[in-house]
Structures are given as structure tokens and as C-alpha cells.
Amino acid sequence: MPTKSEKTQRRIVDAANQLFYRKGYNRTSFTDVVEEAEVPRGNIYYYFKTKDEMLHAVINQRLDTTNTMLNDWEKQIPEPLDRLVRFVQIMYDSTPALLQSGCPMGSLNVELAKDQPELKSDAKKLFDVFQLWLARQFSELGYPDEARELSMQLLARGQGVIVVAQVYQDPGFLERGTKDINRWLEDLARYA
């Protein structure tokens, strides 16, 4: 059972996570987080001395959540093609949020890459966890030599579809894009 202190810290990290996603890291202030988390201002400084520390906590939370999800898929979905299709399904399932704020890991990495390389290297871990997992799926699918390249292509296709759908506010494009990616995956499985 989490302590009161752990619950407060979790509330702060959850609030920061949502704000960094909706507003962006650089446009989110400590005041924004205090208001979103509904904690006294002094409490936030007890847990996080800087916004960078808060970002590290958000990234670690996202990594934990992602790793748990991917491990669950490994246990619940026996075939690598079905696991890859499940990965693509995240885009379709998240259509409203993606149209409003883009991809949480993509938008954060793009924002930080502009002038905060030290923070971006930490945020890149969000892509790394997916890239490594996807490469394992492609290797199991029958493409051990091409696994890394195929994983990068899948990430790029997904990010591209999300960006264009968000720019044009077109949920149909997102749906068509995910179907196109799934056809590509099915073709790969057929010829493996």
C-alpha cells in the first residue's frame, strides 16, 4: 500500500506527464503542475527541485508503463505478427488524443531535440524500448537480419501517419494509415 508521500509524488508525476503531453515540456511551469496535481506549491519542491528532475520521473513512469504493457503482450499474444498488429492498434485506439496533441513520445523528443540534447537523450529511451521490442518481433517473424531496420520503418511509418493526421485533423487518415501499416506487416509475414 503506497504511503501518503508516495501518493502525492505519483499525483505530481501524473499531472506533469499529462501537461508535458498536452502543452509541451517547455510551456509547462511548476505552477501548472501544482494546479493540475492539486498539491500545495511547497510539496512540489520537496519531491522535485527542478523541472528536469520532474521530466526524468515522467520518462521513468512512461518506461515502466510501456515495459509492463509490452511484457503483457508477450504473455497474452502468442504470434509475433499479432503482437505487431497490437502495437499498430495503439494509434487507432488513441485517435482523439493523437489528433489533439500528437504522439506523447514523438512530440516530446521533437521538442527536446531542438535545443535540449541532454534531456532528449533521456526521452529517446521511450523510442528505444519500442524499437528493441519491435525488432524482437520482426526477428521472430522470420527477419533476424532485417529486424532493426524493419522496427525503425514501423516507428517511422507510425510517427508519419500521426503527424499528418494531426496536422489535417483527419481521423480517417489515421485509420487508413494504420490499415496500410497492417497490410505491410501481413505481407512481411506472408513472405517470411
Image (tube, rainbow, N blue to C red):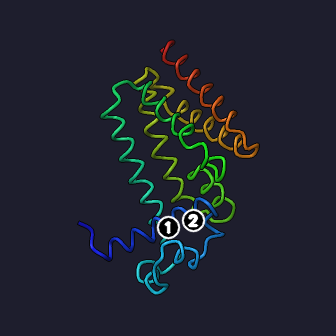
Q: Nearer the viewer, residue 45 or 172?
A: 172
Q: What element carries label 1?
A: helix
* Residue 177 spot, x, y in % from top left: 65, 31
Residue 31 vertical position relative to residue 1 in the rendered view, above or below: below
Q: Which amino acid does label 1 sit on?
A: Ala
Q: On the image, numbered disc 2 is attached to which residue?
A: 19
Task: Name the residue that disc number 1 marks.
Answer: 15
User: Residue placed at 42% from the left, 48% from the top?
Assistant: 66
**Residue in the foreground of this view, choosing between 27 and 116:** 27
Cβ atoms under marks 1 and 2 closer than 8 Å: yes
Query: Position of 192 compared to 31: left or right?
Result: left
Which one is nearer the viewer's eye here, 68 or 3? 3
Q: Where is residue 162 in the image (x, y as percent from the top left)?
A: 65, 42
The answer to whether residue 116 is above or below residue 165 is: below
Amino acid type of disc 2?
Answer: Leu
Q: For the residue carrying disc 1, how many other residues have a C-alpha within 10 Å: few (<14), some (14-19), or many (20+)?
A: many
* Residue 144 vs residue 19, the one in the foreground: 19
Query: Which residue is located at x 50 percent, y 67 percent?
Result: 15
From the viewer's perspective, tell me whether residue 5 is left or right of residue 23.
left
Q: How far apart are marks 1 and 2 (CA)?
A: 6 Å
Q: Which image quadrant for residue 7?
A: bottom left
Residue 135: give x, y in percent of width and height: 46, 33
Name the spot of residue 47 as percent of width and height, x first. 41, 78
